[in-house]
Image: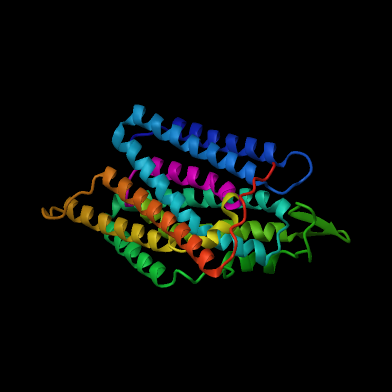
């Protein structure tokens, strides 16, 4: 899809404006804990925005491009659920107060969005120039899917090179100073753990992009769709963090579903590369098939996880607590 610079600029400006309004509405006044009611509203809001954007693509660019966007968005959003496990670990490790967690996630996601943008531009240019990279991406996705299947119970956070550099170069206060990222102590400018955890969230998400970006390039080669699908998925990630809460621990089969999706896209990418290279037996997988497989996989694994959690609770003899609705 041929997208002008002005359209790129308008879309990016629109996304930033929405995030600015989100931050102003949620964080105005005294800092407070993000409620379940707020999280549900904003998750619905961002999902609705993504759906409207996809419908707009249908009328402007056709059904194929719209289908590519929805398949890419669903894939990125699904893979983001797995990221949330690590985000919980990071928040716990740095002991981030709950009233500041929304701001940490917002800035971390903005950092991730900027870095992913560069990654997407480089990836699109490389794929256009070196077609053999499709085989590399496909094999990498299959390998990642197999590794995820083998290590679905292993969730850990290791400080990356950039995070270690920030810790070493910038003097850091012992504790949080409200929501400030910088402060002065005895006339000396220091950063707070707030900045450190923002860098941790942003750079850790970039590491996750090593499989999610190749995955979406397996569904579409259009850099504009790749970027917008990533942007909408990341924008809704913060609220999903608060909405799911302890439910993440019950989604025991999600990693199996995600590993299957990565493997499926990897095989699709290799088959389509073979087809483009003149191999007649290698089929092209229509985008509606990809969208159906991804959607069905996430529905099945989510429902199966919740059923297993309910059965496990019954076997343990624990009473099922009544549902509570948080007042925002």
Q: Quadrant of the N terminus?
A: top left
x and y percentages locating residue 126 in the rendered image: 34, 53
Residue depicted at x 24% and y 58%: 270
123 sits to left or right of 135: right
The coloring applied to the image is rainbow
In the rendered image, residue 309, in percent from the top left (x then y), is placed at: 50, 62
User: What's the residue at 48%, 48% (across, down)?
Assistant: 117
Pick whichever, 158 or 54, lies toward us: 54
Residue 70 x/y as whole percent: 38, 41
Q: Is residue 227 magenta?
A: yes
Front residue of 227/312: it is 312
Considering the image in quadrants, where does the C terminus appear? top right
User: Is residue 138 toward the left or the right of residue 110 in the image?
Assistant: left
- Asked if residue 313 is positioned above or below residue 70 in the image, the reply reads below
| Res 135 quadrant in image | bottom left
Q: Is residue 197 visible?
A: yes
Magenta span: 218-242
Tell me where residue 64 appears, x and y as whole percent: 29, 37
**Magenta segment main secondary structure:** helix
């Amino acid at each position: 899809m041929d997208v002008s610079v002005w359209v790129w600029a308008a879309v990016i400006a629109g996304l930033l404006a929405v995030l600015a309004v989100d931050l102003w509405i949620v964080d105005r006044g005294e800092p407070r804990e993000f409620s379940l009611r707020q999280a549900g509203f904003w998750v619905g809001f961002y999902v609705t925005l993504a759906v409207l954007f996809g419908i707009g693509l249908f009328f402007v660019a056709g059904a194929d491009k719209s289908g590519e966007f929805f398949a890419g968005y669903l894939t990125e959003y699904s893979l983001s659920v797995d990221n949330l496990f690590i985000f919980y670990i990071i928040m716990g490790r740095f002991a981030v107060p709950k009233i500041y967690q929304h701001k940490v996630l917002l800035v971390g996601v903005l950092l991730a969005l900027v870095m992913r943008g560069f990654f997407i531009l480089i990836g699109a240019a490389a794929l256009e120039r070196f077609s053999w990279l499709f085989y590399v991406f496909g094999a990498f996705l299959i390998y990642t899917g197999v590794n995820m299947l083998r290590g679905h119970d292993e969730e850990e956070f290791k400080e990356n090179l950039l995070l270690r550099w920030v810790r070493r170069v910038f003097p850091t206060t012992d504790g949080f100073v409200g929501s400030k990222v910088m402060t002065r102590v005895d006339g000396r400018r220091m950063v707070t753990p707030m900045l450190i955890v923002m860098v941790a969230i942003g750079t850790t998400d970039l590491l996750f992009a090593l499989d999610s970006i190749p995955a979406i390039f397996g569904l579409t080669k259009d850099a504009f769709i790749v970027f917008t699908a990533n942007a909408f998925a990341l924008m809704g990630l913060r609220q999903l963090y608060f909405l799911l809460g302890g439910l993440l621990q019950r989604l025991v089969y999600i990693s199996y579903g995600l590993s299957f999706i990565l493997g499926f896209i990897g095989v699709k990418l290799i088959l389509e590369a073979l087809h483009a290279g003149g191999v007649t037996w290698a089929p092209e997988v229509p985008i509606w098939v990809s969208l159906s497989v991804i959607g069905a996989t996430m529905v099945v694994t989510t429902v199966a996880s919740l059923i297993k959690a309910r059965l496990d609770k019954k076997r343990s003899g624990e009473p099922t607590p009544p549902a509570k609705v948080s007042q925002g």
